[in-house]
Image: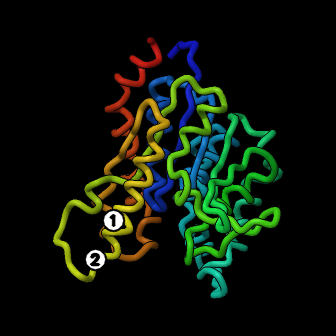
Amino acid sequence: MSSSKKVGLALGSGAYRGFAHIGVIKSLKKNKIPIDYLSGCSAGAWIAAYYAAFKDLRQVKKDLINNKKESVSLLLDFDWSAGLVSGQKLISYLEKRLPGRNFSSLKIPLQIVATNLSTGQAFVFDHGNLAQAVRASISVPLIFKPFSYQGKLLIDGGLSNPVPGDLVRKMGADLVIGVNLYHQKEFKTGRVMMSNIFRRAERIILYNLAQASLQNCDVVINPDISRYTGKSGFIKYFTKEAADQIILIGEQATDKMMPIIKAKLKT
């Protein structure tokens, strides 16, 4: 689609929900919507980094979906000091998959957000080693050991800016599309029981954090992946069937927003 407006895409946090970002990008490409700037947080940082580096969804799917055994092995890297997973296998994996990639060599300008554990403020990566930025951004507390960088301890960016639309706006985007992976249905359905109060509370916090972050976006894509929140066993999310379905949900959610996106690009 021909337009003089620059489009910025902000891919939000969401763990396994992040497969939906692949569907979002697929829909944008299908409808010839340009992606001039990218920002990412946590799972969104991972997908954004791949797409900014290769501008090709096949590489993302090959590494994250079609290679389940290696993907799951990244979590079998126990540390026990400041998180269950040390993250050493993960960063080695990312450096192998993104060899020599610095922000300056990317095909699409990109910024990635993590959270400074000491200050609680967002920490933005916009230069340097791409693998390190992704490793920092996905450092879910208690799961991954915080990432040490320039004297700072960095954790999951979702705790400070879960849908970083403000970053692509500052980079020069006229139209900011944000992808929020936290849906109300994740905590509005089902019975409230003592056994699930903590999980529901966690989802409410994540949802409300994302809503605050979305104030910087002109268009919000909100894939409903709630049907997968009850799946038992994290490894099941890495099955091709589950990943493909989540990708499809992301694509369909973006297709529904396409008339609004195209209208905003024309005005």
The location of residue 129, given as percent across then percent down, is 79, 53
Q: What element carries label 2?
A: helix
Q: Quadrant of the C terminus?
A: top left
Work out whether 89 lies above or below 258.
Answer: below
Work out whether 238 lies above or below 171.
Answer: below
Q: Is mark 1 on a helix, strand or loop?
A: loop
x 64%, y 26%: residue: 172
Query: Residue 229 — which label?
Result: 1
Going by the numbered disc 2, the residue's amino acid type is Asn
**Measured Cα–Cα span from mark 1 to mark 2:** 12 Å
x 64%, y 32%: residue: 170
Query: Label 2, on which residue?
Result: 196
* Outermost residue toward the bottom in this view: 80
Q: Quadrant of residue 221?
A: top left
Is 62 in front, or is 256?
256
The residue carrying pointer 2 sits among few (fewer than 14), some (14 to 19) or many (20 or more) residues within 10 Å by Cα, namely few
x 53%, y 57%: residue: 158
The residue carrying pointer 1 sits among few (fewer than 14), some (14 to 19) or many (20 or more) residues within 10 Å by Cα, namely few
Q: Quadrant of residue 132?
A: bottom right
Does residue 63 appear to the left or right of 101 in the view shown? left
The location of residue 119, given as percent across then percent down, is 65, 63
Going by the numbered disc 1, the residue's amino acid type is Thr
x 36%, y 64%: residue: 203
Does residue 105 appear to the left or right of 118 in the view shown? right
